[in-house]
Amino acid sequence: VIDSDSGVLLFLALASLGVYSLVLAGYSSNNKYSLMGSIRASAQMVSYELALTTAVVCALIPAGTLNLAEVVDYQRAHLWQAISQPIGMLVFLVAAFAETNRLPFDLPEAESELVAGYLTEYGGLRWAMFFMGEYMSMTTLSALFVTLYFGGWSLPFVDFSGLSGLLQALIGFTVLAAKIAAMLFLFVWVRWTFPRFRYDQLMRLGWKALLPLAVLQLVATAAL
């Protein structure tokens, strides 16, 4: 809700604090399964944050700004960046799944190996707050994803500029909410479709596939 010139940096700075909650939750539980889950969470989130941040930079370079409203204006004047930068979009999408610990990347909570990992010793409201944080993270990453790559609150070939300011705001909010809802549906759909990765596959995908692809997209975008 803050129209900041450093909006993306503010978002990434706040989002990066999430790893502390998982690490401290597992460490303070005095349970080996919780500790293993928290270690997995820290390694996974740090690894995939690199690819995610690089994909964010890929979307910012053409617009030449860190202001999310100006990124949306750029896409309104040109193409959605999902069309012009499909590799960056896919990298961001996969990294978002890993950042939110959703299947097939839910290694920190793996019920079959770690009995729910860092959540093992928590119940009631404490348990609910972890899941509330996870779903809030899904929603905010979905909002950032559709803002950077799918035109945010705009629609292609539709111009709302002739309408009143209030009507523009209502239509824009509805469009953005619909895009976020579609992204959240994708999160749930993938959860019941793909099996969980092994831990070595998880780390190999992050470091040997996603990060090189993101850097390649970054170099190509900057060159063009």
Image: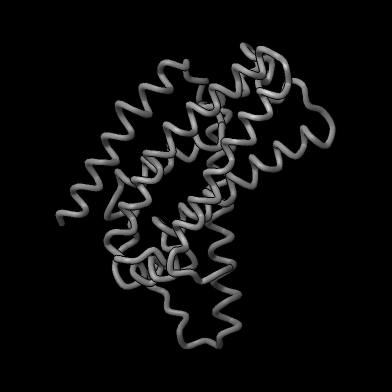
Q: Look at the image and tell me whether residue 182 can be seen.
A: no
Q: Residue furthest right?
A: 124
Quick check: 21 left or right of 13?
A: right
Image x and y of residue 105, in percent? 51, 27
Quick check: 122 left or right of 147?
A: right
Image x and y of residue 165, in percent? 56, 85
**Occupied quadrant, residue 75:** bottom left
Image x and y of residue 126, in percent? 79, 35
Foreground pick, 150 / 136? 136
Quick check: 210 left or right of 224?
A: right
Image x and y of residue 86, in percent? 30, 47
Identify the residue shown where x is 61% and y is 11%. Answer: 113
Identify the residue shown where x is 55% and y is 88%. Answer: 164
Foreground pick, 4 / 158? 4
Quarter of the rendering occupied by the C terminus:
bottom left
Quarter of the rendering occupied by the N terminus:
bottom right
Foreground pick, 83 / 61? 61
Q: From this view, report whether residue 192 is shown above or below residue 99.
A: above
- Total tally of numbered discs in the picture: 0
Identify the residue shown where x is 48% and y is 54%. Answer: 144
Foreground pick, 12 / 203? 12
Q: Look at the image and tell me whether residue 197 can be seen.
A: yes
Q: From this view, report whether residue 154 is shown above or below residue 105.
A: below
Coloring scheme used: one colour
